[in-house]
Image (cartoon, grey):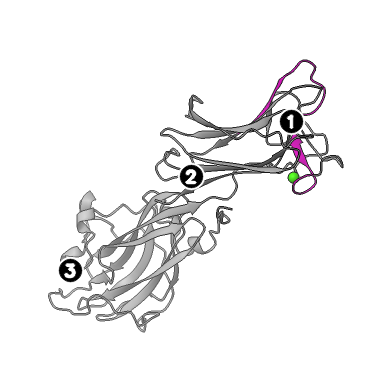
């Protein structure tokens, strides 16, 4: 049905070369221009607090050991290799200027961009370190991968740094790419603002929607909370599971009870860079059947709640009394303030001692495409 790619949390590549940049103060935006001589921030001894990075914190991780022979991975050219207007000091500049947007990227995918750092000054830059500044929403979705930037970058030389971006949340992510270096008299840096937007769909957010977790007859089903009735995971030759061996049903033995309900709450404040789940579309899918046609009607309900669990809205799924497995599905955009979603399974007893509703293959997933 709808595409629901696996939600990967592969951070192995993302942590390379990015340690310990948190202590470095964010450079003033007005000083982040890397395209001209005026783009550099100078921080001399005794400089004031707004002078940027002093270059002595050691917080940026030095990349590869390649030094004076550094060249680009590719044939990409720097934006400027001229030394016109440059001072007698070293001056580093990014080929992409002051900003770069990775644009819309599914939260399941990893993308890369190669940035080139060029010394457009007239002296060698020493102690060159390139790092991702530990600031901004979703900054940890950016990380340095391959790099051939060494400790020294001579005038006219360039080196290449590959940055990996894998959004972990829906929405706009941001971080700063820094190239710090020393001159004979001070420490400077070039800065570039990186952005990217996470889109796409999550994996299944529901726990034990297939009824496969828990021993036969276990009540309530692991991951679920019974509101009324027993509710169990079970399997039976009389009712073959839709998938796997087990399903979830209300159980037997509640005399006089007519409404059976079980629920599962899903916190959803960890899905977006804007905090709540406003604007996120939630999809529900469930397979449902009765014992015989016309048995006890059953359905699911998807509810949206704020942080205090006040209801903000709900979607009542289709009611089924089919004697065969039927796929039920619905989608709804979460209202502003949504912090919790709740899937409830409902069965209305018509006769007998057990509500004949069998749920299997249930999933809830979130989608946002910008
Ligand atoms: Ca199952």
Q: Which residues are magenta?
A: 241-264
Residues 142 and 350: in front is 350
Element assignment for label 2: loop
User: Few, some or many C-alpha atoms within 10 Å of disc 1 (few <14, some 14-19, many ≥20)?
Assistant: few
Mark 3 C-beta to ligand 1 under 8 Å: no
Comes first in the chain, label 1 or label 2 = 2
Which numbered dot is residue 271?
A: 2
Chief secondary structure of the magenta span? loop
Which residue lies at the image location 58% right of the left edge and 50% below the top edge? 203
Compared with 300, 287 (above or below) is below
Q: Are marks 3 and 1 in contact (CB under 8 Å)?
A: no
Provide the residue designation for mark 3. Answer: 36
Residues 257 and 164: in front is 257
Q: State which image quarter holds ligand 1.
A: top right
Q: CA distance from mark 3 to mark 1?
A: 77 Å
Provide the residue designation for mark 1. Answer: 294
Compared with 28, 86 (above or below) is below
Mark 2 C-beta to ligand 1 under 8 Å: no
Residue 58 at least partly seen: no
Which residue lies at the image location 82% right of the left edge and 34% below the top edge? 217
In-image side of 330 versus 337 (left or right): right
Image quadrant assignment for residue 63: bottom left
User: Few, some or many C-alpha atoms within 10 Å of disc 2 (few <14, some 14-19, many ≥20)?
Assistant: many
In the rendered structure, does residue 256 fall within the stretch colored magenta? yes
Image quadrant assignment for residue 18: bottom left
Give the image location of residue 266, x and y in percent: 57, 37
């Amino acid at each position: 049905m709808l595409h629901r790619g696996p939600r990967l949390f592969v951070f192995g590549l993302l942590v390379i070369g990015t340690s310990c940049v948190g202590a470095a103060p964010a450079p003033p935006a007005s000083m982040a221009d890397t395209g001209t001589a005026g783009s550099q921030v100078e921080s001399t001894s005794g400089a004031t607090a707004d002078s940027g990075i002093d270059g002595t914190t050691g917080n940026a991780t030095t990349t590869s050991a390649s030094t004076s022979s550094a060249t680009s991975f590719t044939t990409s050219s720097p934006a400027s290799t001229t030394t016109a207007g440059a001072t007698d000091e070293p001056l580093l500049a990014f080929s992409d200027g002051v900003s770069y947007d990775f644009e819309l990227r599914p939260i399941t995918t990893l993308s890369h961009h190669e940035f080139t750092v060029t010394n457009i000054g007239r002296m060698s830059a020493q102690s060159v370190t390139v790092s991702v500044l530990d600031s901004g929403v979703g900054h940890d979705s950016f990380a340095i991968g391959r790099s051939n930037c060494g400790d020294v970058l001579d005038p006219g030389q360039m080196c290449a740094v590959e940055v990996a971006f894998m959004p972990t949340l829906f929405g706009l992510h941001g971080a700063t790419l820094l190239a710090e270096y020393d001159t004979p008299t001070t420490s400077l840096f070039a800065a570039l603002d990186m952005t990217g937007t996470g889109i796409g769909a999550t994996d299944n957010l529901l726990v034990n929607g297939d009824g496969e977790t828990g021993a036969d007859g276990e009540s309530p089903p692991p991951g679920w909370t019974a509101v009324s009735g027993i509710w169990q995971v079970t399997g039976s030759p009389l009712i073959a599971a839709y998938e796997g061996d087990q399903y979830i049903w209300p159980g037997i033995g509640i005399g006089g009870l007519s409404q059976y309900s079980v629920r599962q709450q899903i916190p959803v404040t960890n899905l977006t860079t804007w905090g709540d789940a406003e604007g996120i579309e939630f999809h529900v899918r469930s397979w449902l059947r009765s014992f015989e046609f016309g048995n006890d009607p059953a359905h699911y309900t998807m509810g949206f709640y704020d942080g205090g669990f006040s209801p903000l809205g709900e979607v009542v799924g289709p009611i089924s009394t089919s004697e065969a497995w039927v796929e039920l599905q619905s989608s709804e955009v979460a209202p502003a303030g949504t912090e919790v979603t709740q899937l409830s399974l409902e069965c209305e007893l018509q006769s007998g001692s057990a509500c004949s509703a069998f749920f299997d293959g249930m999933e809830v997933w979130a989608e946002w495409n910008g």
